[in-house]
Image (spheres, rainbow, N blue to C red):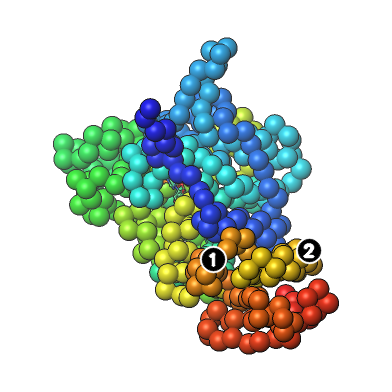
Amino acid sequence: MSKITAPRGTQDFIPPQTSRWQELEARIHDLTHDFGYGEVRTPIFEATELFVRGVGETTDIVEKEMYTFKDKSERLMTLRPEWTAPVVRAALQHGLLGQGPQRLYYVGPIFRYERPQAGRYRQSHQFGIECFGFKGPEADFEVIQLAWQLIAGYQLRGATLFVNSIGDEACRPKYREALTAHFGPHVESLSEDSQRRLQRNPLRILDSKAPEDRPFIESAPPFESVLCDACREHFEMVQHYLYEAEIPYQVNPRVVRGLDYYTRTVFEIESDALGAHSTVCGGGRYDGLVRALGGPDTPAVGFALGLERFLTMVEAAAASAEAQRRGIQFIALGGEARERLVHLLGYVRKHGGVPAYMDYEERKLLAHLKIADRNNARYALIAGTQELEEGSLVLRDLLSRTDRRIPFQFEKDTAAVLVEMGA
Ligand code: ATP
Ligand code: MG
């Protein structure tokens, strides 16, 4: 019988990788909480219409990446390819946007039918925030700061923040014209996607990854040249706040974001740990979206961050630093020692708050120590026949590889041992 494997472009996560996911998720919940954001969870599938209207018909997502199917009553459904449209749908459905500003965040899977490769999956996971109800640059700054703080919290180096402004309904049409004039004469040389987008949405060409488009993108006029006064002032304030908060950034006229509903501020965070798919986080302001989805005029700004790519950055940083050792490996040599140590293990697990590991098979000391290394334990607590007779234990520091014999009355001194090991 042929083996069944996970579908192409999807991954299983197994220990110890899952603990890195849990840690990241825990940090996300803490950080968002500290900024005053509350969590939203939406269904994994929605009416296809939501994404067609909310993401935009000329985007990669709607043009070619959606997992769309008909359910048994012939309704067209799509697996969530991004979270912003569902979050807006939920906020409208529950009347949140009529109650003043809302700060919301999400963490969970998205589905996109893409060509799988490193850093690009068919099921991936995003963390993102959406800040509704503020039209001023303060909210743009808040959103960027939150994303940056997640990176700073892991002390990740090699990450770069790029910011840009893509204007509003006053100046965007002028920019479209400038781009059409720029790309128009070279239409034959552009990629198929870009040729198609030239008429409908020339801004999207700036976002193209096709190599044949590169030279024309590089010589395209920057938005700066046509930005209206209000947009320019907004953009300058965002930069001023970033500067004051000592968040390093670069203005990059090529950052436009793939989704149609963005206005004014757009930003991306790239990392040199990621190779070709260097963008880990993308976001910006999308003042037009809520209305496009049938809601009241509501300014909004947010971002989405890819958890797979973020963890690649974390792993690259961890590879250069010694992994943090934590916890105690209990090692019993012989049946009697095992019985005593299992008691102690139970006690530590009940009272400890410190990771406690034990292998119950009869093995040589060396084999047990290898297991301790695999668990990344800080200490080994070793008991054999001699220790039982003497009423002692050997405490091995697995970092310095030194032993200490500690007097130990089994069962009586457990609390003292716990303190000793920093529990
Ligand atoms: P790209 O240009 O790489 O296709 P995108 O513009 O489609 O990215 P967004 O829709 O802005 O990406 O999603 C935000 C983040 O989510 C990306 O920066 C990336 O980290 C992550 N992401 C998006 N699609 C995938 C995917 N297929 N696999 C893994 N991560 C992804
Ligand atoms: Mg994409």
Vertical relation: 372 (above or below) 285: below
User: 10 Å neighbourhood of mark 1: few (<14), some, or many (≥20)?
Assistant: few
The secondary element bearing badge 1 is classed as: loop
Instruction: Locate residue 273: give its quadrant.
Output: bottom left
Where does the C terminus fall, quadrant-wise? bottom right
Which is more toward the observer, 366 or 107?
A: 366
The secondary element bearing badge 2 is classed as: helix
Badge 1 amino acid: Arg
User: Are the two marked residues, 1 and 2, in contact with CB atoms closer than 8 angstroms?
Assistant: no
Which is more toward the observer, 380 or 93?
A: 380
The circle drawn on residue 114 is: none
Q: Position of residue 135 (x, y in %)?
A: 61, 51
Which is more toward the observer, 201 or 67?
A: 67
The circle drawn on residue 363 is: 1
Q: Is mark 1 within 8 Å of ligand 1?
A: no
User: 10 Å neighbourhood of mark 2: few (<14), some, or many (≥20)?
Assistant: few
* Structural distance between the alpha carbons of marks 1 and 2: 26 Å
Q: Which residue is mark 2?
A: 350
